[in-house]
Image: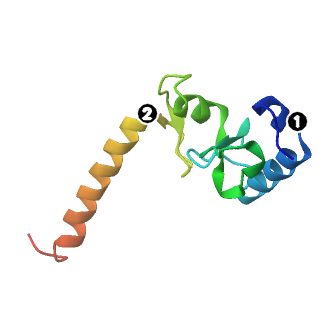
Amino acid sequence: MIYPDYDTFLISPKWAALREVALQRDGYACRLCGSPASVQVHHRRYRRTWDQTRLDDLTCLCAVCHGIHEGRLPAVPIPLRSGFDQCLTILGFAVLLAVLAGLAAIVIGSPSGSS
């Protein structure tokens, strides 16, 4: 069936089935921050017609990450998957990763017990 518009597709049995499979595949959690809250299924790629939508076109995002990705929300703090209590901005997280990578290089690169 060819759907005349996006809204019609979103109420179709095909979308309901694809959405549920995407949610199951992604563990009912955001693929960016890991949050299980307000998970939405996002189209990573749009096909020429809605009936051509495939599972690999979809990914799960929480409402916040979805809004940031689509430019509806400014970049805001996101919780880390590792369970830290604090939140870091996406930029802050990238800086933290760079610092940790630098520390790992120093620790791994130096023989133990040397000065």
Residue 101 point in image, percent of width and height: 29, 58
Residue at 80 percent of width and 29 percent of height: 7
Task: Give the residue number, with chain letter if any, for mark 2.
Answer: 89
Instruction: Give the quadrant of residue 108.
Output: bottom left
Dot 1 lies on which element?
A: loop
Amino acid beneath label 1: Ile
Chain-order first, disc 1 or disc 2: 1
Tell me if 27 is positioned left or right of 64 in this view: right
Tell me if 88 is positioned left or right of 17 in this view: left
Report crowding for label 1: few under 14, some 14 to 19, many 20 or more residues within 10 A (C-alpha).
few
Amino acid beneath label 2: Thr
Determine if residue 37 is in view. Answer: no
Q: Is 58 placed above or below 11 here?
A: below
Disc 1 from disc 2: Cα separation: 35 Å
Q: How many marks are shown on the rendered structure?
A: 2
Task: Give the residue number, with chain letter if any, for mark 1.
Answer: 11
Q: 98 or 13, which lies in front?
A: 13
Dot 2 lies on which element?
A: loop
Instruction: Give the quadrant of residue 8.
Output: top right
Q: 21 or 50, which lies in front?
A: 50
Residue 84 point in image, percent of width and height: 52, 45
Q: Is 62 placed above or below 55 here?
A: above
